[in-house]
Image (cartoon, helix red, strand yellow):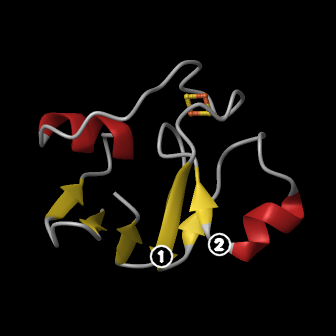
Amino acid sequence: AFEVRLASSGRVIPVPADRTVTQALANAGVEIMVSCEQGVCGTCLTRVLQGEPEHRDSYLTPEEQAANDQFTPCCSRSKSACLVLDL
Ligand code: FES
């Protein structure tokens, strides 16, 4: 498990092992548009301001993934204890 922090409000939302980031956000009332929910389409792409995502998508190039400044919250997770999102 890890948590995400919303940069705009400072809200911290825990992401349990059995939920995706988009599910955890939706439960907290923060809706992110999703489509494929498999890391293919890029609809959910979200900017990451701090922390290191664990990329599980096939949408970003390896170079884009390595930059760690965006991720796909429908399927990707976090290597850091906390990811700060531009939300
Ligand atoms: Fe398609 Fe996240 S919804 S990549």
The vertical placement of 35 against 13, above or below, is: above
Quadrant in the rendering for residue 14: bottom left
| Left or right of residue 19, residue 78 in this image | right
The vertical placement of 75 against 15, above or below, is: above
For image coordinates 78% across by 40% down, the residue present is 58
Mark 1, residues whose alpha carbon is within 10 Å: few (<14), some, or many (≥20)?
some
Q: Is residue 68 visible?
A: yes
The front one of 67 and 23 is 67
Q: Position of residue 29 (x, y in %)?
A: 13, 37
Q: What residue does disc 2 label?
A: 68
For image coordinates 55% across by 76% down, the residue present is 52
Q: Is residue 20 visible?
A: no
Ligand 1's quadrant: top right
Q: Amino acid at mark 2?
A: Asn
The front one of 82 and 1 is 82
Label of residue 49 in the image? 1
Determine the secondary structure under disc 2: loop
Determine the secondary structure under disc 1: strand
| Left or right of residue 62, residue 23 in this image | left
